[in-house]
Amino acid sequence: MHPALDLDRLSVLPYPLRLRAKLLCLKGESVSVVKQLDDYVRANILDPVALSGILPILYSLLDPARIPHENDFNPEAPTDTDDETRLDTALTALTWIKAQAVLVPAADSDVGLLVWQRVWRWLAYLLRFRDTLPVMRDADAEASVCRSALDYAGNLALPLQGRQSVSTLVATPGLFRVLARAWPAQRADDAGQDRSANIGAISMFLANAEPIIDRAVLELAEGAGSVRALARLIVLHVSAALQEFEQGKVHIDAVLGVLQFLDDVVVQPRAKPAQIDLLPSLSAVGAPKVLLGTLRTLVRHAQAHVQAEDAEVMLIRSIQFVTRLLETTFEAELARGRSRLLTDALWNGILRILVDIAALGLDVVIARFLQVTLPASATRPRCIGAWANVHEDVQPPVGTEAGSTVSADWAALSKLFEDHARVLGGSKVHANHFQRLVRCCHNLSCLRRDLAPPARMRRCSGCKEFWYCSRDCQVADWRLGGHRNACEHHAVVHLYNNRPYRAFLRALLVYKFGKHAMSTKNFAYATAQSITHITFAGTSVSSVVRSRADLFDVTPSDPAIPRFLLPAWEDHFRRDTYVGAQWDLVLLSLKCSPDADWWHWMIPLHRRLDSVEVIVDQCVV
């Protein structure tokens, strides 16, 4: 027994009760001790000194030596009478602790923390074998233990916040495991059982436990298991809160509160090396999938309350967090080299949600997503390919109202990719530029060759094409050698050679200007203007019509890239220019009715056409 927990030194208890407790503990009749303690506490409930004297008795009742060894535990074998008595005693003690809440004020003492450590060990054991232990086969007993664990967590967080002792760090790892095991016991199919109180208990713990979470897993050898248990607990909490919201039991603020906690504890602390990183564990337990489901529910809620004042604020907050978490999750998975399927599925999911948000007319939400999330991920071809796939499959919200303009979300999307054209182009560099060992300085007044390792030569960060022996040469060539214009031109050349980006540009061309064409009743002019606008993105160098045609040109050997027939204004460009370039985006004459839906006359072209007149003559609208 711990020297500070000697029953003979408990002067705060009456002598008869102290002597009786010692004798009963020695004989193993601990249930009687609990009952006598219950009577004593009821009579002295307002005496904190007397309550603190009960902790050593509880420490003896919850001795880990009384727990049957987990490795030797056989559920099929009959339970020993002594083991069953000890389990009954522990269960009675835990229930009594919950009812009297004696450990809440005592958690700020060293003895109280030691008792808490034993409480977590007993709860973990009872919850692990709850399906086989005789004392846990009763539904009421199981619910009582699980509920006790939830109540303990919610009430323990506040007293432990100000603690800096090692005993606090020792007490917390078992807490996460107990809560992760206690939560699944609250089954959703239990008729008449309201889990709102359980969600409230976990919410209280998560809201107050940030200092504990930050310190607990840093100095403990078993911290990795605690982090994974905490990540699983967070995912279960998000799922349960979402289910309660769908059933109308909690307000939307409860779900947003969970997202805010994840933002504060998971996403933001990654910049601080002294705090833990929960993202790998969250990825392992399926957090991105759960968060996507949460986001879909929020979008459905916004669709039902689209006129509500808090709809935009709600979606902005939720999307801002979810996209940041997905981005950091992708980074963690990319480092492991196994994230291709995960990232593709998640990007497609979140982009389809974004299309639904665009249908609500909440331009502020989608603009926020484009400004915060997409620039960081736009250098990844998968992101661009996901955008193209979404635009191919999902029809945009095209209105027929007269005088309507291009939706602000698609305009923001176009502007974003215009601003980041050089970044996108610079990320796709030909491999031979990295393999060359002999490079020449592109400054005409220098022309120095470098036969040494390539680290001595500087490459232009804009076009990724020109090399310089020093920064002075690069500045001189930029100011006097005309590299300012050439840099932009080469950046766009690399950009246009990116096949996923070409597919995205075609989809962007169709979707962005479809609504404008419908409102102006002039499909040809809108399409011609869109081609000119998009192909000049990121460059001030004029290009001829043939180069713009090559941008959208695809061959029959590229089945993955969609092919569209887009109308254009015949008077804007010469017809012979298009025929000479052999466009796959073939001109349609103005025979197309302006009243027809603009996507109905988009015909996939699977072969190269020799003449524009062929498709014009065969086109029936």
Image (tube, rainbow, N blue to C red):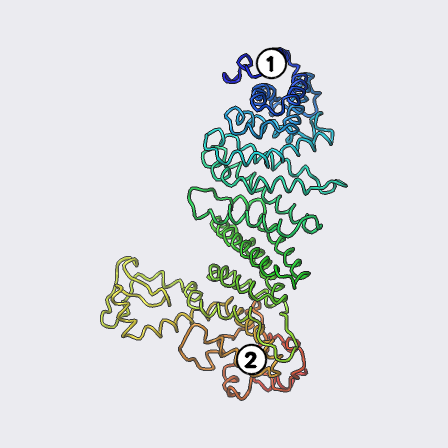
> Tag 2's secondary structure?
helix
Q: Residues within 10 Å of mark 1 (few under 14, many from 20)?
A: few
Q: Are marks 1 and 2 in contact (CB under 8 Å)?
A: no
Classify 41 as above or below 490. above
For the C terminus, which image quadrant? bottom right
Residue 318 shown left or right of residue 451 in the figure: right
The label shown at residue 14 is: 1
Q: Answer with the quarter of the image where residue 615 lies.
A: bottom right
Find the residue positioned furthest to the front: 46
Q: Which mark is residue 79?
A: none
Q: Is residue 503 above or below residue 620?
A: above
Q: Is residue 393 visible?
A: no
- At a point 60% along the width and 76% down the height, the residue shown is 514
Q: Secondary structure at mark 1?
A: loop
CA distance for labels 1 and 2: 93 Å
Mark 1 against mark 2, which lies toward the viewer?
1
| Residue 119 % position (x, y) | 59, 27
Mark 2: which amino acid?
Thr
Which sits earlier in the primary sequence, circle 1 or circle 2?
Answer: 1
Under mark 1, the amino acid is Pro
Q: Residue 246 in the image: x percent, y percent?
A: 69, 51
Q: Position of residue 597 (x, y in %)?
A: 66, 77
**Quadrant location of residue 7?**
top right
Q: Is residue 360 above or below residue 536?
A: above
What residue is disc 2 on?
527
Front-most of 610 and 467?
A: 467
Residue 110 visible in the displayed image: yes
Q: Give how far across and how far down residue 396 sits, in percent.
A: 62, 70
